[in-house]
Amino acid sequence: MDFSDWLFILFYNTLKACFEQILWIWGAFFLIGFALYFISNLRDKAFAASIGHKAELFLTGWIGVPVHEMGHAVFCFIFGHKITEAKFFSPKEDGTMGYVKHEFNPKSTYQKIGNFFIGIAPMLFGTVVIYALLGILLPDYLPEELNGSIAETGWEIFKNFFSFSNFSNLRFWIFIYLSLGIASHMKLSIQDFKGATSGFLTLLCLIFLINLIATAILNFGLKSILLSDWLTTQINVLLSLFYPIMLYALVLSVLYLLFSYAVLGVVRALRSKVGK
């Protein structure tokens, strides 16, 4: 094999590994993120056309907005960004409900990658908070062991939800309401998407470089890397925790959307009767 063939195979395997890793780790995350965005927009329009956009703030916004903005702030701290101004709950007439302004060193690769995680922080942090609430209010619902299977872990967490005893369990309803408030405001704003995109490009370059080095080492005859196997196992376990909670948040958001349409239907029916 000449050098050009070796180089082609190296880059091909590197790009393939990058694509598989991004799809494996982030694929479902992005799909859920876009779904939450569109569902939230539809819900906001339905409430605005029925009981007014401010009413939704009092239903769930007082819970979800501070958690949303706190997620940005926490990841600013993790990635060394300087927070210049923060409002965790400050509804404005233009639709702004809160914000976190931050600065970073553009020469720092770590802080540039931080833009991605700060942008998507409301989904990550919201998921962690919902999981923490589950542990505080319904600790018996947590899985005893984590095996890295998203389906099995999700079933272990939520199988107890289908129990008639929950109807008389106050802690269960408190969890449902609090998690609904968080889930309904986990969506990313346009500014969040823009910030995440700039950081994601830097993250892609880093992923490509790491895979390029790893693929080159493998091509030199190293057949297995124990660290890689360990990381894969740990990521699988982490995903098995995150994705069931995110899917739960998506289900709650869909139910909340249906509720907003039901309210809109009732209001329209009442208006038509009054009009007659």
Image (tube, helix red, strand yellow):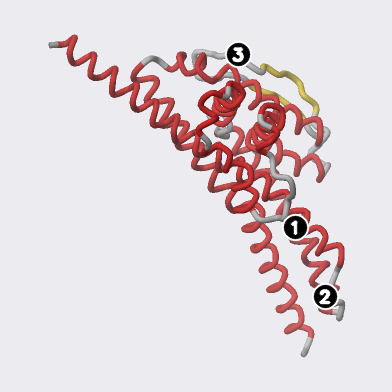
Q: Amino acid at mark 1?
A: Ile
Residue 216 coordinates in the image, percent (x, y): 82, 73
Q: Which residue is disc 3 drawn over?
A: 90
Q: Is residue 114 left or right of residue 222?
A: left
Q: Where, by quadrant of the figure, is residue 98 drawn? A: top right
Q: Counting other residues with Cα less than 10 Å from the Cα at mark 1, is it few (<14), some (14-19), or many (20 or more)?
A: some
SS at badge 2: helix
Q: Counting other residues with Cα less than 10 Å from the Cα at mark 3, is it few (<14), some (14-19), or many (20 or more)?
A: some
Whether residue 64 can be seen here: no
Q: Residue furthest top?
A: 274
SS at badge 1: helix
> Who comes first in sequence, dot 2 or dot 1?
1
SS at badge 3: loop
Residue found 43% across the figure and 25% down from its top: 44
User: Closer to the camera: disc 2 or disc 1?
Assistant: 2
Check residue 126 in the rendering and tell me which mark sits there, or answer none.
Answer: none
Look at the image and tell me in which quarter the C terminus lies: top left
Residue 122 coordinates in the image, percent (x, y): 64, 33
Residue found 61% across the figure and 40% down from its top: 245
Q: Pointer 2 and pointer 3: residues touching (CB < 8 Å)?
A: no
Residues at marks 3 and 1, CA–CA distance in whole angstroms: 38 Å
Q: Amino acid at mark 2?
A: Leu
Residue found 45% across the figure and 29% down from its top: 256
Q: Which residue is disc 2 drawn over?
A: 218
Q: Residue furthest front?
A: 165
Q: Counting other residues with Cα less than 10 Å from the Cα at mark 2, is it few (<14), some (14-19), or many (20 or more)?
A: some
Q: Which residue is disc 1 drawn over?
A: 207
Residues at marks 2 and 1, CA–CA distance in whole angstroms: 16 Å
Relative depth, front residue between 5 and 230: 230
Q: Where, by quadrant of the figure, is residue 234 drawn? A: bottom right
Q: Amino acid at mark 3?
A: Ser
Look at the image and tell me in which quarter the N terminus lies: bottom right
